[in-house]
Every structure is written in structure tokens, then in C-alpha cells.
Amino acid sequence: MRNERKQVVLFGYGKAHDELAGRVVVLGYRALRATDVEAAVDLIRRQEQPLRVLLFPIDAPFGNRAEELRRMSEASGALGLRMIVTGPQPGAAAIAALKRDGVRYALWKGFHDSDLRFTLNAALYDETRGQVRPALRVPASLVARVRSGAGEKAAMLYNLSTTGAFVETTRPGMPGGRVTLMIEFPDGVVETDGSVVFANVPGNLQKPNLPIGMGIKFTATDATAAQRIAKYVAEKARGYEL
């Protein structure tokens, strides 16, 4: 059965918007599309489950953006919509206007699918339904190394939380294996011990939306390393908000 909470309304039109809708679908969400405000309001009202997310480009065809966003949000029910703007990053005045209009998140031109997935998940999170939110996991493109009994291997950090990470590597370790992960943050290397909880390998992708590599759960992180990881995660998450 379809998970209705994963529905996303896309408002706008054009080639770039078509491509964005395709990316949303490939990531496992349902894209509900509207090209004018009246159609969007009607679409939102007709859903059996309240919609939570509206995704629109910076040049979307609004007349009075603040008023029309308000109408769409009210049509979704008491909780309203969480709104994500996409496209070329405008200047400070335009960003301030978006914030005044109730827009919370932004995906500026050049964002990756990992950025899109993170932002959609953040916007879809519904604290009123008793959902248990796991540790915040942010996209990360950082050089790393993984040390195990078999030696050291190069890796790229794909995502990171305070409790674990997924690292992209052509030689992932076996589940249950003990490793030390060394992450090259801009201000220096952070080292933490962990265990491999799953491996994505050719022919056996445990999580098809992730690249070849492995998920690592942190098992021993000293206080300084933990603080630096938490700081990076918090700053990265704030980067998706206006």
C-alpha cells in the first residue's frame, strides 16, 4: 500500500521542473503536480491524507506568492505545508521575502539527490503522529579512510549522523566487522570506532538508493570527536534552511 505521507506537491512547469519530478519519483516519493494555483489548491484538498510538502521553483508562476502559498497551506489542513524552494540562489532580500512568505527549506541549483532526499524527509517528518525520529543523518561529501584487520582502504563519506555513517568504497567490509573510521573534516581528521551493520555490494544491494559501500554504526567515540561530528551535522542541516 502506498505511504501517503510520502506525497509531495510540485508546483510549476517546464523542462527543469519535469526533471525534478522525475528525481522525486526515483527517490521513492509520489509527485503530485500542478501548474497553476487553483489546480494546486484543488489537488491538495482532494487528498484523503493531509499533504505536508510543497516543492516549487524560485520562478514559479505566482501572482501574489504570500497569499497563494497561504491558500495552498490552508487547503492541506490544520498542520499546513512545509515549503521547499529550488533553483538559482537569489540575493539576501529575496531570501528574506521567501522566509516572510513561510518558506522554510531551500535546494539551490546544483543540489544532489542526497540533498533532495534529506530535505524531503525533514519536511515530511510529522511530530504529531508519534513518529520516532532517529539521529539526524545529513548528506556529506568528505574524504575518509577505513581501517580494519585487513588494512586501510580509501572511502568517501556519503552521509553522517552522531550515531553512524555510510561510506562509499569499492571494498566494503562484511557485516559485523570492526572498523575505525577516519573522517577528514576541513579542520582536521576525526577518528571513531564502529561496526559494519550492512554492506552494499554489486549483485546484493541491501539499500538500492545508496552507492556501493557500507553502513557503519559508531561504537566508541571520544568526547572531542563526538562534539565535532555533532557540530558538522547541525551546521550541515541548517544549510538546507532559509
Image (cartoon, helix red, strand yellow):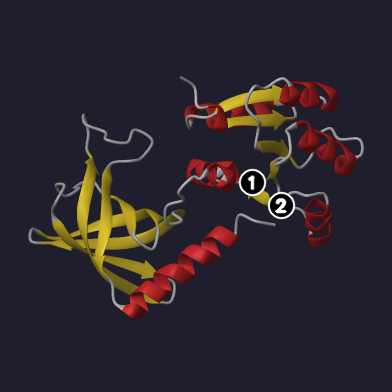
Is residue 113 visible to us here? yes
Q: Which mark is residue 89?
A: 2
Label 2 Cα neighbours within 10 Å, binned few <14 / some 14-19 / many ≥20: some
| Contact, mark 1 vs mark 2 (Cβ under 8 Å) | yes
Report whether 150 appears left or right of 102: left
Mark 2: which secondary structure?
loop
Report whether 221 appears left or right of 38: left
Seen from this angle, which residue lies furthest left?
149
Mark positioned earlier in the residue sequence (1 or 2): 2
Report whether 208 appears left or right of 232: left
Task: Find disc 1 in the rendering and name its residue.
Answer: 109
Give the percent coordinates (x, y) of residue 196: 20, 52
- Residue in the image at 77% along x and 26% along y: 40
Report whether 20 appears left or right of 136: right
The image quadrant of residue 182 is bottom left
- Residue in the image at 83% along x and 28% along y: 37
Seen from this angle, which residue lies furthest bottom?
224
Q: Is residue 229 above or below residue 206?
A: below
Foreground residue, 242 or 212? 242
* Quarter of the figure that contains the C terminus: bottom right
